[in-house]
Image: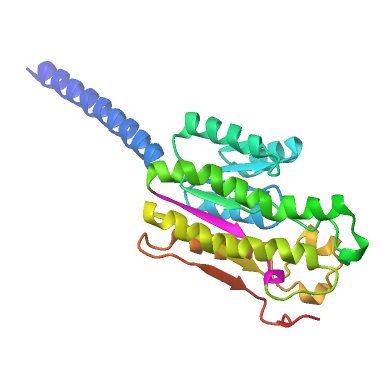
């Protein structure tokens, strides 16, 4: 009788353990299914890398994209990001291919952050040739439009999503030598306003983040004095994360981020 009772207890314990393992597996799969996915361009350095870390720390599935394969691989390996792809953001067909890959693998993208950009040449427009001008417009404006168009289509089908486009204070405060870059970034700001009007009926949010100078490689290469770089990439990442995670009934149309000691008007 004692042995029989012991046997029954052993069987019951095994059943409990089996059910617990099964429950954990189901909950894990449910968690993966419900995990929000963010795609960030230009995420191997600067604002993009800081934002990717912020989203990863807060339970998002993080996918990064950049044009340098070695840097993408290193960023994924060093930071535990979920996936990484090589993408030339100026190539429309590259965006289309990436959308197909991510749709097949993950089904949906909840947040797109169009962060890739930079000053291809910071100089008076009279000192730039056609290639200089075209490169700046393609990298800083066209790429944002391409990404928003391609992944906006996906989000329309989902009837949900958030697109965050990174502009610059140059969109509103232009300094000498920055005219072409400023034109592109002003385009990003106003494009995002129109994008929200177009996508809002489908439950999609569009936000423009407008950062001042921060301590990134681009700012240093552009010759911005160090005293004007009081912002850190993490400060911009915090703003991006906030805009992406406000309650579903709320939209941040635009957010300008200044360092408290920075000069607001053109130099």
Query: Which image quarter: residue 247?
Result: bottom left
Residue 161, given in percent of the width and then of the height, sits at 44, 50
The answer to whether one can see residue 70 in this image is yes
Quadrant, the C terminus = bottom right
Residue farthest to the right, as pictured? 127
Q: Residue at x 55, y 42 (%)?
A: 150
For this rendering, which residue is in front, 142 or 242?
142
Residue 188 in the image: above or below residue 225: above
Q: Residue furthest left?
A: 1
Q: Where is residue 137 in the image (x, y as percent from the top left)?
A: 74, 55
Residue 207 is situated, as x and y percent measured from the top left of the image, at 52, 62
Which quarter of the figure is the N terminus placed in? top left
Relative to 256, is 131 on the left or the right? right
Q: What stretch is highlighted in magenta?
A: 160-171
184 over 52 or under it: above or below: below
Report if residue 123 is visible in the image: no
**Left or right of 108: which side holds 220?**
right
Residue 18 is left or right of residue 32, and the answer is left
Q: In which quarter of the image is residue 209?
A: bottom right
Inspect the magenta stretch and tell me whether residue 165 lies in it: yes
Quadrant in which residue 177 is drawn: bottom right
């Amino acid at each position: 009788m004692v042995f029989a009772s012991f046997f029954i207890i052993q069987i019951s314990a095994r059943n409990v353990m089996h059910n617990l393992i099964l429950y954990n597996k189901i909950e894990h799969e449910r968690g993966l299914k419900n995990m929000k996915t963010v795609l960030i361009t230009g995420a191997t350095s600067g604002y993009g890398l800081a934002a990717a870390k912020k989203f990863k720390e807060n339970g998002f599935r993080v996918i990064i994209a950049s044009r340098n394969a070695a840097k993408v691989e290193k960023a994924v390996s060093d930071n535990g990001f979920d996936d990484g792809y090589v993408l030339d953001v100026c190539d429309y067909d590259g965006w289309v291919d990436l959308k197909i890959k991510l749709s097949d693998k993950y089904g949906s993208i909840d947040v797109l952050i169009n962060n890739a950009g930079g000053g291809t040449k910071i100089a008076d427009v009279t000192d730039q040739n056609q290639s200089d001008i075209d490169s700046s417009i393609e990298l800083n404006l066209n790429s944002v439009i391409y990404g928003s168009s391609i992944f906006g289509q996906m989000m329309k089908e989902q009837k949900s999503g958030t697109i965050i486009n990174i502009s610059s204070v140059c969109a509103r405060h232009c300094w000498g030598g920055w005219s072409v870059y400023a034109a592109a970034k002003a385009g990003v700001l106003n494009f995002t306003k129109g994008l929200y009007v177009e996508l809002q009926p489908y439950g999609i949010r569009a936000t423009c983040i407008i950062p001042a100078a921060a301590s990134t490689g681009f700012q240093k290469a552009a010759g911005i004095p160090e005293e004007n770089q009081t912002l850190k990439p993490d400060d911009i990442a915090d703003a991006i994360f906030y805009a992406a995670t406000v309650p579903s009934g709320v939209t941040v149309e635009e957010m300008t981020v200044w360092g408290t000691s920075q000069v607001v008007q053109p130099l």
